[in-house]
Image (cartoon, rainbow, N blue to C red):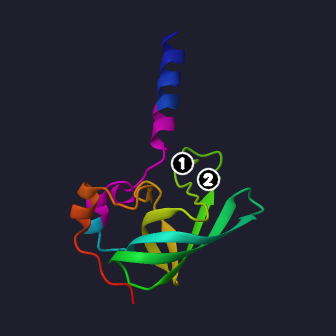
Amino acid sequence: MKKHFTALALCLAAQGAFACKIPPQAYDMHAYLKASDMPKVVVKAKVDDVTEMLRQDGVVEQRVELTASSWWRGEAMPNITMIASTGGMSGTSCEGVWDFSVKKGEEWLIVGVMTDGIVHPLPKLSTKITDGRIPPQLKKMLGRAKAVS
């Protein structure tokens, strides 16, 4: 009996060692804003167009065209392309953690990183805007918005 308990404890400990590890800057706005190792993007934008594509690995990828109205981080530009996806990391402890999708006409505060001119959103920090306003505590944290050029 003692051997079975020890084996079970080792299996559970090993399972915990492979749990999904999310860096703080992916879910904590303070950590994100302090991080210096990423090209940050924080923008309020409206979804103009969404093109979905099913990849061979089962991931649904969205190519999203947005019109920006306010910028807090990143190069202020009027139009943005974003890549979002759902169904990634299937079968792992991170399954669903990075899922993010939008619909045409929605307004979002997109928080993410810019790579080669494409925005990659951080799902745990990006916020759908339903009343046209950014939550006051978040707006205070972000500071003054930049003009869109």
Q: Residue furthest right?
A: 56
Which amino acid lies under the numbered mark 2 shown in the image of this protein? Met
Please give the name of the residue rendered at 45% of the width and 55% of the height, measured from the top-left corner: 130
In this rendered view, identify the residue nearer to me: 129 or 33: 129
Do residues under tags 2 and 1 come within 8 Å of each other at their CB atoms? Answer: yes
Point out the stretch of residues depicted in magenta. 13-32
**Quadrant in the rendering for residue 23:** bottom left
Q: Residues within 10 Å of mark 1 (few under 14, many from 20)?
A: some
Q: Is residue 15 magenta?
A: yes
Please, what secondary structure does the residue beneath circle 2 have? loop
Q: In the rendered picture of this protein, how many numbered marks are placed on residues? A: 2
Which amino acid lies under the numbered mark 1 shown in the image of this protein? Cys
Q: Which residue is mark 2?
A: 89
Lateral position of residue 35 relative to residue 64, left or right: left
Q: Position of residue 28 (x, y in %)?
A: 32, 55
Q: Residue furthest bottom?
A: 149
Q: Position of residue 101 (x, y in %)?
A: 58, 58
In this rendered view, identify the residue nearer to me: 25 or 62: 62
Q: Position of residue 53 (x, y in %)?
A: 74, 66
Q: Which residue is mark 1?
A: 94
**Quadrant in the rendering for residue 146:** bottom left
Please, what secondary structure does the residue beneath circle 1 have? loop
